[in-house]
Amino acid sequence: MRKSINGLSLIVLEEMEVAFKCERLFVFVSRCGKKLKLIYWDQTGFALWYKRLEKQRFKWPRNHEEEVILSNAAQLEQLLFGFDVFQKPHIYLQYQQIG
């Protein structure tokens, strides 16, 4: 993961076709899954946040070429703490009667 603010902002603008001056965070994870970068616009310029894990990996979908969306701050926090936010939840079962 060699790209910095300039390279990552170009990816967002050209490939994702998103205007940067909106209230969005863009998350990039390295191929090995140990490095994560967040880039966002904070009304005065671009800001870049970087985290590198020493022993584990971020849970990120493999072979995912399309845009991946984290819909809220709770999902981002869970991702940063090592949870797999992309795993499908259990199906809720509702029974009318038992036995």
Image (cartoon, grey):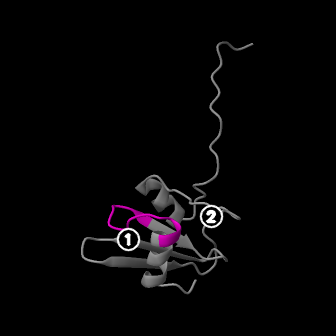
Q: Position of residue 25 (x, y in %)?
A: 41, 65
By secondary structure, the bulk of the magenta-drawn segment is best described as loop
Identify the residue under disc 1: 40
Q: Residue at left 58%, top 59%?
A: 83
What amino acid type should be assigned to the residue bearing mark 2? Trp
- Tag in front: 1 or 2: 1
Q: Is residue 83 above or below residue 7?
A: above
Q: Position of residue 9 (x, y in %)?
A: 44, 76
**Crowding near pointer 1: few (<14 within 10 Å), some, many (20+)?**
many
Residue 34 magenta-highlighted: no
Q: Position of residue 24 (x, y in %)?
A: 38, 62
What's the mark number on residue 60? 2
Extreme-left residue of the structure: 44
Which quarter of the rendered picture does the C terminus lie within? Answer: top right
Q: Residue at left 46%, top 61%?
A: 77
Numbered range of the magenta stretch:
14-25
What amino acid type should be assigned to the residue bearing mark 1? Tyr
77 or 32: nearer the viewer: 32
24 or 32: nearer the viewer: 24
39 or 97: nearer the viewer: 39
Question: Which is nearer the N-term, disc 1 or disc 2?
Answer: 1
Q: Position of residue 53 (x, y in %)?
A: 57, 78
Q: Residue at left 43%, top 82%?
A: 5
* Distance from the alpha carbon under mark 1 to that under mark 2: 20 Å
Q: Is residue 7 above or below residue 57?
A: below
